[in-house]
Image (cartoon, helix red, strand yellow):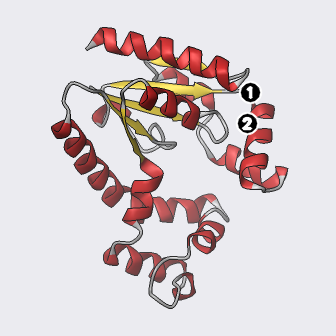
């Protein structure tokens, strides 16, 4: 069983995924896989061609904050980033999912991926889709505290993502994270049991 967990920035995906891990899930973080992807020499070359050679450090590796600054400057720039990174990232993600299933096919594999819905049909990658939602004001506060960025930057990031309602429409399960972390974990644990019951 492959479980996808997605949601907008600041919704609480990490809390849900940590709960799933604590309950026995094998979690694969798409952000970590993304970081691996941008260490690939072909991807590095394409990123440097598109966003400027100065996004590379003295070792020829991508300086992620600088890439992020340029890639999130506009929708067009972000689309260029996704066009370069998504296919190799997806291939590496599939490989890691298969490795995890091979290690222990009795435990669900959890894919923590913010853009699972945005990048096409999530069911081509996962069996069950969990969407984590939260009110925008809570998401903004969490993100500002976690990343130390301005409210304007957070608004831009929220606006750049698919609206929560669009993600909810394709979800198998929805966790509304509008309270404390403890309440979120309780809700996640209930959903986890529902997922296990489907296996």
Q: Position of residue 187 (x, y in %)?
A: 57, 15
Q: SS at mark 1?
A: loop
Q: Disc 1, disc 2: CB below 8 Å? A: yes
Furthest residue toward bottom = 58
**Residue drawn at point x = 27 percent, y = 48 percent:** 96
Q: SS at mark 2?
A: helix
**Residue drawn at point x = 72 percent, y = 23 percent:** 180
Cα distance between the residues tagged 1 and 2: 6 Å
For label 2, the crowd category at 10 Å Cα-Cα, with few meaning under 14, some 14 to 19 and many 20 or more, is many
Give residue 24's mark: none
- Dividing the image into 4 quarters, which one contains the C terminus? top left
Residue 122 versus residue 153 in the image, above or below? above
Q: Specify the quadrant of the image occupied by residue 158.
A: top right
**Residue drawn at point x = 67 percent, y = 39 percent:** 10
Give residue 135's mark: 1
Q: 80 and 97: which one is in front?
A: 97
Residue 64 versus residue 33 in the image, above or below? below
For label 1, the crowd category at 10 Å Cα-Cα, with few meaning under 14, some 14 to 19 and many 20 or more, is few
Asked if residue 37 lies left or right of residue 16, the reply is left
Q: 84 and 15: which one is in front?
A: 15
Residue 135 versus residue 75 in the image, above or below? above
**Residue drawn at point x = 33 percent, y = 57 percent:** 87
Q: Which residue is mark 2?
A: 139
Asked if residue 52 lies left or right of residue 158, the reply is left
Asked if residue 34 lies left or right of residue 7, the reply is left
Give the number of marks: 2
| Residue 155 in sight here | no
Q: 127 and 193: which one is in front?
A: 193
Q: Position of residue 33 (x, y in %)?
A: 39, 55
- Dividing the image into 4 quarters, which one contains the N terminus? top left
Q: Position of residue 38 (x, y in %)?
A: 42, 68
């Amino acid at each position: 069983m492959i479980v996808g967990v997605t949601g907008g920035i600041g919704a609480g995906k990490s809390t849900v995924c940590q709960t799933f891990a604590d309950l026995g899930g094998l979690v694969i973080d798409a952000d970590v896989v993304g970081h691996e992807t941008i260490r690939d020499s072909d991807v590095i070359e394409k990123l440097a061609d598109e966003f400027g050679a100065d996004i590379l450090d003295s070792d020829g590796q991508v300086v992620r904050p600088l890439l992020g600054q340029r890639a999130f400057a506009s929708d067009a720039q972000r689309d260029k980033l996704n066009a370069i990174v998504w296919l190799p990232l997806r291939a590496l993600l599939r490989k890691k999912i298969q490795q995890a299933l091979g290690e222990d096919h009795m435990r669900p594999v959890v894919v923590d991926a913010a853009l699972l819905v945005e990048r096409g049909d999530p069911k081509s990658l996962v069996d069950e889709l969990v969407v984590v939602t939260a009110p925008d004001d809570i998401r903004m506060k969490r993100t500002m505290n976690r990343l130390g960025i301005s409210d304007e930057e957070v608004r831009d990031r929220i606006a750049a993502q698919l609206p929560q309602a669009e993600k909810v429409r394709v979800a198998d399960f929805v966790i509304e994270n509008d309270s404390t972390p403890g309440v979120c974990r309780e809700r996640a644990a209930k959903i986890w049991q529902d997922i296990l019951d489907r296996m």
